[in-house]
Image (cartoon, rainbow, N blue to C red):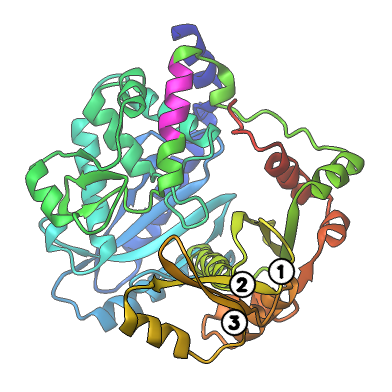
C-alpha cells in the first residue's frame, strides 16, 4: 500500500517550480493591492493552494479582498470590482456572480479569482456566503498534522479518479474542503477510505455541534452524507453530494480495499468502440437524444443547474405520458449539449389500461366512469377493481419529446433557451452520426455500462 501511495503522490504533488510560481504571483498581487487606495483592509489567500493540499497542474488561486463589515454591500461590490479590475488590467478576465459579483481571469497561466469579502469574527456571523471561506482556511491550517496534506491529496485524487470529486452541479460530488475534513476526522487516507466503505445513508460527520442537533436540522433534506461545517454549524459541507455519487464512493472504497490499484486514482484511457459495434448495441435498445448548443458567458454552475433541472423535467414529462425512462445521461464538451434518453419502448400501443376503485365503492366508481374519455374496452371487474381501457392521445415518444421541447423553449431559464434554440431530436441513426471525439468516448462508456474503476 505504501509503495502505491508513494507512486501516486509522485504524480500528483506540485513541483517546487509550480509552488514557487504560484507563491510569487500571489505576493505580486498582494503588493499591488496594498498600494491601491481604497476602503479595503488586506488580501487573503484561501483554497487548497494556500493550504498546500492542491494537486499538480491545479492552477486555481482563490484571493479575497477583505473589507470592514460595516461597509454597505453596494460599496463592497463597487470597491471590490474596482480593485480587482486594476489587478487584471492587461489580462483576460470576466465578471462572475456568487452572492455578489467578483472578477476572475487568467494571469501568467493561473486561473485567478479575486472576491470581495467582509471581515467577521466567525463563520456563523457571515454577511455573505464567501465570508466563511477564510475561516475554512484557518480551521484546516490549525488542524493539520505532519503528513496529512499528502493524505488529503491522495483522497482528492482517489475521488477524482472514480469521477466523484467536485461540488459543482456538473459533478454533484464532494468539494475539496469536505475531502480535507474527512482527513482531519479519520487521520489519514487509508482510514478515511475504510470509513467511507462502511458509510450508510444519512451518515453524519460532526465536529462541533452534536449529531442530535444535526439530525434535527437536516431531517427534511434526505442528504446521503452530512458533514457539519465546523466553521458554520448550520451548513452541510456535503449538501451537493448526490445519492449516485455517495453510493459510487462507498462502492469504489470497498473495491479498493479488497484490491488496491493505481486504476482507482487515474482513469484509464477510454476504449472507444467501433461504429459497427455501437450500431449493433443501439439496435438492442430504445433510445432518443436531444442535441443543442452549450450556453456561453454564464457560470458553469448556473448552466449545469438548469441542465440538470431540464433533464429531470424531461424524464418526468415522458413518464407522465407513459414512456418509462430507464436511464438518462447529460454530456457536454462546452460546445454541444446532448441528453441521452433510454426508454422501455419508443412506441406505445393505442389502448391504455386504467385501474379504478374497488367495485363495491359505488360513489368513487361513479366518479371514475363519469370522466370524459374515449373508452375502448370495459368497464369490467378484475381483482375486485373496476378496469377500463382508453385511447392514448399520443403513442410516439419522438412526438411527445417534441411537445416537451416546444413548451420548454418558453422557459425563463436562459441556459435552456440557448440550448433549445437550435436543438434537434436524434434517433438512433442520428446518434451514430454524432459518434466522434469526446461524445464517442462517453457513448462507449455508457453502452459498456461499467464504472471506470472496475
Per the image, the residue denoted by label 3 is 408
Left or right: 4 as drawn, with respect to 63 = right
Front residue of this view, candidates 202 and 437:
202
The N terminus sits in image quarter: top left
| Pointer 1 with pointer 2, Cβ within 8 A | yes
Q: Is residue 248 magenta?
A: no
CA separation in Å, label 1 and label 3: 26 Å
Front residue of this view, candidates 426 and 155:
426
The percent position of residue 244, horizontal first and vertical second, equals: 46, 45
Compared with 330, 84 (above or below) is: below
* Badge 3 density bin: few <14, some 14–19, many ≥20, Cα 10 Å: some
Residue at the spot 27% in from the left edge and 19% down from the top edge: 146
Per the image, the residue denoted by label 2 is 352
- Report the magenta residues as a range: 249-257
Q: Earlier in the sequence, mark 3 or mark 2?
A: 2
CA separation in Å, label 3 and label 2: 26 Å
Picture quadrant of residue 267: top right
Q: Earlier in the sequence, mark 1 or mark 3?
A: 1
Camera-nearest label, 1 or 3: 1
Picture quadrant of residue 132: bottom left
Callout 3 secondary element: helix
Per the image, the residue denoted by label 1 is 349
Front residue of this view, candidates 274 and 17:
274
Amino acid at each position: 500500500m505504501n509503495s502505491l501511495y508513494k507512486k501516486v503522490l509522485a504524480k500528483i504533488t506540485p513541483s517546487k517550480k509550480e509552488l514557487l510560481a504560484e507563491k510569487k504571483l500571489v505576493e505580486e498581487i498582494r503588493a499591488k493591492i496594498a498600494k491601491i487606495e481604497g476602503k479595503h483592509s488586506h488580501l487573503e489567500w484561501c483554497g487548497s493552494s494556500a493550504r498546500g493540499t492542491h494537486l499538480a497542474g491545479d492552477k486555481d488561486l482563490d484571493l479575497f479582498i477583505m473589507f470592514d463589515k460595516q461597509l454597505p454591500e453596494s460599496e463592497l461590490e463597487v470597491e471590490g470590482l474596482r480593485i480587482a479590475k486594476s489587478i487584471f488590467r492587461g489580462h483576460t478576465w470576466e465578471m462572475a456572480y456568487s452572492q455578489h459579483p467578483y472578477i476572475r481571469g487568467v494571469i501568467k497561466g493561473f486561473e485567478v479569482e479575486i472576491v470581495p469579502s467582509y471581515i467577521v469574527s466567525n463563520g456563523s456571523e457571515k454577511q455573505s456566503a464567501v465570508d466563511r471561506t477564510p475561516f475554512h482556511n484557518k480551521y484546516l491550517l490549525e488542524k493539520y498534522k505532519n503528513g496529512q496534506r499528502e493524505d488529503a491529496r491522495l483522497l482528492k485524487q482517489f475521488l477524482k479518479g472514480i469521477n466523484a470529486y467536485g461540488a459543482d452541479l456538473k459533478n454533484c460530488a464532494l468539494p475539496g474542503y469536505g475531502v480535507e475534513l474527512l482527513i482531519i476526522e479519520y487521520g489519514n487516507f487509508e482510514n478515511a477510505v475504510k470509513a467511507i466503505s462502511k458509510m450508510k445513508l444519512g451518515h453524519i460527520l460532526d465536529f462541533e455541534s452534536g449529531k442530535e442537533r444535526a439530525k434535527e436540522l437536516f431531517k427534511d433534506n434526505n442528504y446521503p452524507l452530512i458533514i457539519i461545517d465546523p466553521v458554520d454549524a448550520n451548513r452541510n459541507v456535503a449538501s451537493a453530494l448526490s445519492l449516485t455519487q455517495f453510493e459510487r464512493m462507498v462502492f469504489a472504497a470497498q473495491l479498493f480495499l479488497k484490491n488496491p490499484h493505481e486504476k482507482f486514482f487515474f482513469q484509464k484511457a477510454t476504449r472507444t468502440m467501433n461504429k459497427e459495434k455501437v450500431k449493433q448495441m443501439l439496435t438492442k435498445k430504445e433510445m432518443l437524444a436531444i442535441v443543442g448548443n452549450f450556453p456561453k458567458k454564464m457560470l458553469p454552475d448556473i448552466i449545469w443547474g438548469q441542465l440538470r433541472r431540464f433533464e429531470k423535467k424531461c424524464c418526468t414529462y415522458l413518464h407522465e405520458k407513459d414512456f418509462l425512462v430507464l436511464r438518462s445521461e447529460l454530456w457536454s464538451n462546452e460546445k454541444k449539449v446532448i441528453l441521452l434518453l433510454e426508454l422501455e419502448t419508443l412506441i406505445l400501443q393505442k389502448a391504455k389500461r386504467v385501474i379504478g376503485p374497488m367495485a363495491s365503492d359505488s360513489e368513487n366508481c361513479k366518479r371514475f366512469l363519469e370522466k370524459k374519455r374515449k373508452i375502448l374496452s370495459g368497464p369490467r371487474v378484475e381483482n375486485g377493481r373496476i378496469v377500463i381501457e382508453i385511447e392514448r392521445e399520443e403513442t410516439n415518444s419522438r412526438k411527445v419529446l417534441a411537445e416537451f421541447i416546444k413548451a420548454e423553449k418558453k422557459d425563463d431559464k436562459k441556459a435552456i433557451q440557448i440550448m433549445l434554440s437550435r436543438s434537434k431530436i436524434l434517433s438512433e441513426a442520428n446518434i451514430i452520426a454524432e459518434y466522434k471525439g469526446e461524445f464517442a468516448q462517453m457513448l462507449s462508456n455508457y453502452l459498456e455500462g461499467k464504472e471506470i474503476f472496475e
